[in-house]
Image (spheres, helix red, strand yellow):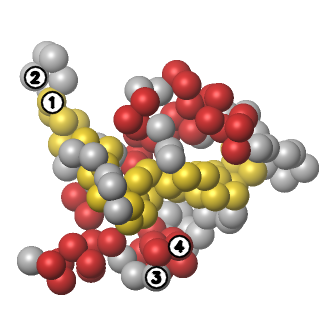
C-alpha cells in the first residue's frame, strides 16, 4: 500500500494484507510499530488486526519488553496519547515477537496464535 504526501511524493507504507480496517479507517501497522519502538522500554513490537464485532478489526500491539525492565498497559496507553486516537492500539499483549531468519516479523504466526486463523483468510472466505 502507498500514500501520497502533500508534495505529491508516493511512499510505500505497508502490505495490503497487513492493513487494518477499523471502523472504516485504514491503519498501517508499520506506522504504529515505528511509533511504539520509540518507547525506551520496548525491545520489539508487532501490530496486527484482531476481529471486533463493532469495528470490524482492532489494532493489537504485541510488545516485547526490554530484558530487565517492566512495562504496564497503562504506560503504553499514556505513551500513545501523542498518536491520533483512531491509530492507538485498542489491545496490548506482552509477549515475544517472532521473527523469521531474515528478521521479518511473522505476522501470520501471530494471527494464528491470537485469532485462530488469519483475518485475511476469513475475509477471503466471505468474498
Marks 2 & 1, CB-CB < 8 Å contact: yes
Front residue of 103/126: it is 126
Front residue of 65/21: it is 21
Marks 4 & 3, CB-CB < 8 Å contact: no
Which residue is located at x 10 percent, y 22 percent? Answer: 8
- For disc 3, the neighbor class at 10 Å (few under 14, some 14 to 19, many from 20) is few
| Residue at the spot of label 1 | 4
Residue 101: x and y in percent read 54, 73
Q: Secondary structure at mark 3?
A: loop
Q: Earlier in the sequence, mark 1 or mark 4?
A: 1
| Residue at the spot of label 3 | 116
Q: Is residue 12 visible?
A: no
Specify the farthest residue to the right: 68
| Residue at the spot of label 4 | 114
| Residue at the spot of label 2 | 8
- For disc 1, the neighbor class at 10 Å (few under 14, some 14 to 19, many from 20) is few
Classify residue 70 as left or right of residue 33.
right
Measured in 3D between alpha carbons, the distance from the residue under mark 1 to the one under mark 3, in whole angstroms, is 34 Å
Which dot, 1 or 3, sits closer to the camera? Answer: 3
Q: Quadrant of the C terminus?
A: bottom left
Measured in 3D between alpha carbons, the distance from the residue under mark 2 to the one under mark 3, in whole angstroms, is 40 Å
Q: Secondary structure at mark 4?
A: helix
Q: Quadrant of residue 42?
A: top right
Amino acid at each position: 500500500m502507498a500514500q501520497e504526501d502533500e508534495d505529491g511524493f508516493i511512499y510505500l507504507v505497508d502490505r495490503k494484507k497487513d492493513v487494518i480496517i477499523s471502523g472504516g479507517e485504514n491503519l498501517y501497522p508499520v506506522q504504529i510499530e515505528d511509533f511504539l519502538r520509540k518507547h525506551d522500554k520496548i525491545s520489539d513490537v508487532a501490530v496486527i488486526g484482531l476481529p471486533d464485532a463493532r469495528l470490524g478489526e482492532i489494532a493489537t500491539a504485541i510488545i516485547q519488553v526490554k530484558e530487565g525492565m517492566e512495562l504496564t498497559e497503562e504506560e503504553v496507553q499514556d505513551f500513545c496519547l501523542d498518536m491520533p486516537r483512531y491509530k492507538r492500539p485498542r489491545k496490548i499483549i506482552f509477549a515475544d515477537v517472532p521473527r523469521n531468519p531474515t528478521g521479518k516479523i511473522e505476522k501470520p504466526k501471530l494471527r494464528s496464535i491470537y485469532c485462530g486463523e488469519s483475518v485475511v483468510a476469513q475475509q477471503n472466505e466471505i468474498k
